[in-house]
Image (spheres, rainbow, N blue to C red):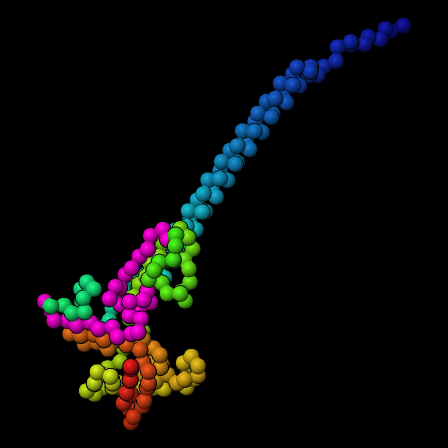
Amino acid sequence: MNKLFINKYVVGLSLVELMVALALGAFLSIGIIQVYTSHRQTANNTEGLSQMQDNTRYVLNLMGKSIRNAGYTGCVSKDRGGSTSDKADDIKFDNILNNATGVLYNFEVPVEGFDNVTVKPSVLSSGDPTPLAGTDLLVLRGGVGESVMVANTNTPALFYIDHTGTESNACSGGGSKVSGFCVGDIVAASSCMASLVFQITKLTNNAGVVSIEHS
C-alpha cells in the first residue's frame, strides 16, 4: 500500500512580509501623488502667469493710444506747467469750460495719478463714481477723433469749418451730427501758436460752411 505524504509547510507570504509590501506600496503611491501634485501646481502657476501677461498686454494695448495722445491739442506744443501762456515761445492755451479745473476737463494737466486711494479725491465731483478703496487712478486728458480745417476768419465766440457731411439723429437726444460734431461736444480750436478748449452750443450749416458757436 502506498503512503500519502502531506506537506505541512504552505508556500506564501508571512504577515511581516505582507506588512512590508503594503508599506512599500503606500510609500510609492505617496511619492507618485506628490510628483503629480507638484507638476499640476507648476502647470497652474504657469497658466496663471500666462493669463496675467495676456491681461497686461491687453491693458497696455487698450491704454497705449490714450497715453500717447495725453496732452494733445493739435499743432500746439506746450509745456504743461499750469500757466495759460508760455512766455518764451509765446504759446497760449485757454480752457473756457465751466468746470475747467475738474477731473474730466482740466486739460492743463494731461496726466494725473492717484496712488492707493482710500477716500474719494477732492478733484472728483459729486457725480463721479467713488473709486474702490486701495486702488490706483490714472487720468489721461487730450484730444481724440478726427480734425477739420478752419474755413473762414473766426471770432472769439464763433468758428467756421468746412462742411463734410450731416448725419441725422446721430447725436444723443436725436440731434444731427454736422461735420462730425454734435452740440455739447468738447472741442479744441488750435493753431501752432494758440489753442482754445470750449463746448459747442450751436451748429449751423450755411452754404457748405459750418459755424460753431460757444458760450
Q: Position of residue 37 (x, y in %)?
A: 52, 36
Which segment did they paint magenta? 88-117
Q: Report whether residue 103 is seen.
A: yes
The residue depicted at 29 percent of the width and 81 percent of the height is: 215
Closer to the camera, 119 or 162? 119
For residue 44, above or below residue 178: above
The residue depicted at 66 percent of the width and 19 percent of the height is: 18
Closer to the camera, 137 or 162? 137
The residue depicted at 32 percent of the width and 86 percent of the height is: 203
Q: Is residue 93 magenta?
A: yes
Closer to the camera, 26 or 53? 53
Closer to the camera, 23 or 181? 181
For residue 5, above or below residue 149: above
Q: Position of residue 211 (x, y in %)?
A: 28, 87
Q: Position of residue 155 (x, y in %)?
A: 21, 85
Quarter of the image where one finds residue 149:
bottom left
Quarter of the image where one finds residue 60:
bottom left
Compared across the picture, whether 194 is left or right of 37 comes to left
Q: Report whether residue 142 is seen.
A: no
Compared across the picture, whether 1 is left or right of 85 comes to right
User: What is the total number of numbered labels drawn onto the structure image?
Assistant: 0
